[in-house]
Amino acid sequence: MSRIYLDHAATTPPAPGVIEAVLRAMREEWGNASSSHSPGQAARRMVDSARVAVAELLGARAEEIFFTSGATESVDWAVGSAPRFIRGRGDRLVSSSVEHPCGLSSARRVEEQGWKAVQAGVDGGGLLDLEAFKGLLAVKTALVSVMLANNETGTIQPVRDAARMAREAGALFHTDATQAVGRIRVDVNELGVDYLSLSGHKFYGPKGVGVLFVRRGAPLEPFMIGGEQERGKRAGTMNVPGIAGLGVAAEMAVRCLDERAGHARKVRDALERGLLSRLSGPEINGCPEPRLPSHLNIHFPGVDAESLLMALDVSGIAASTGSACASGAAEPSHVLTAMGLPRIRALSSVRFTTGGENRMEDAGPAVEAVVTAFERLSRSSPRAA
Ligand code: PLP
């Protein structure tokens, strides 16, 4: 049975060049990047060139890039730990109701440290309600955190406008760009953000490595203390293989962005057209545009999403209900319910995300498999009545 992987938002397969860089760092350049001898300096050079590549990807300076273990850590650092280092700007965080679970947890963490956290809502298409957002900024706000693109629906948020409003209100701005990086152009200066988080494995890099961008002059305190790594801000022996792989992934993301986005969009659109033309009930969740080229979140009325995913897995199709971190739980997606969709609709919705693992020819068999599974489950589901 040939497998069709339609879950690129959960993770992407490491690119061959990434694997080579990881292997080289493990086999040859295995020195400690903090050592001053030659093996250490060879490892250090891999880290340095990865930092330059990531900076180039984001339009940032190399010294504004801090390597972390992934976006969860980066968000926890910039947002969850903000009360430790953002001072003199009030004690309030404004975020959105559709942040990734790591963003929601960070908002709870700032409250544990005495700040107040409030959430701006989204409209029925999942877009930030900018008027309501502006209203929230009327109260003195220290930090705003709004994701660049949603992991479940792919909706691209008006971060540039939101960051401008935050700046005018005297607040610093963080964006979780984990889903956006490698799929659309992301430039920290065009967006006007002070902090940005990303994870390597979402754009063909290794797992367990990510980045926090911190604009020069923006406040920051160490996340982990111990050694002097990452200019004393994030201690611990550096993950040279992961960082080297991330650097190659960043270079490729710059070089291949248009080609990759165009390919993902073609496959996604073929899947979307196929499903909507073959089935009368299903509808897209979230606004069709602005949306990442890879994402398709569909409501299959009367069918339990988990049962549909299991049936698809048996036929070789890998998809998901949204946030991989929340999968397995029977709770409806907080993103879809924040958009005002009923709980029952959220529990009947599936996310397909396309990317480098797909060929154009995958769309037809994937549509067939979904149509077959949906029709069979519709006949047997009590909800179908
Ligand atoms: N933020 C968003 C929008 C994500 O989609 C994810 C992963 O799904 C994360 C943060 C967390 O990334 P990681 O698990 O690599 O730390």
Image (cartoon, rainbow, N blue to C red):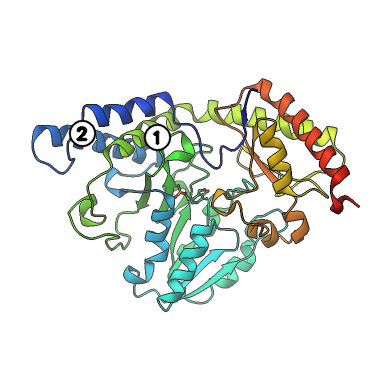
Q: Residue furthest bottom?
A: 114
The circle on residue 250 is 1
Report whether the residue tagged 1 is closer than 8 Å to ligand 1. no
Mark in the foreground, 2 or 1: 2
Give left or right: position of 255 versus 318. left
Amino acid of disc 1: Ala
At label 1, counting other C-alpha atoms closer than 10 Å, the crowd grade (few under 14, some 14-19, many 20 or more) is many
Where 171 falls versus 158 (above or below)?
below
The residue wearing badge 2 is 30
Residue depicted at 48% across the width and 67% down the height: 107
Is residue 27 depicted above or below 323 in this figure? above
Secondary structure category for the residue under label 2: loop
The x and y percentages for residue 96 are: 57, 62
The N terminus, quarter of image:
top right
Give the spatial CA distance, label 2 vs label 1.
21 Å
Q: What amino acid does circle 2 point to?
A: Trp
* Residue 143 x %, y %: 44, 66
Residue density around tag 2, few if under 14, some if 14–19, many if 20 or more, within 10 Å: some
Q: Residue 25 carries which label?
A: none
> Is 39 positioned to the left or the right of 81 in the image?
left
The answer to whether mark 2 is within 8 Å of ligand 1 is no
Quarter of the rendering containing residue 375: top right
Tell me, yes or no, if residue 75 can be seen here: yes
Give me the residue at 71% from left, 29% from top. 366
Looking at the image, which residue is at 31% across and 49% down? 64
In the current view of this chain or complex, which residue is farthest to the top?
A: 361
Count how many numbered circles sit on residues in the image: 2
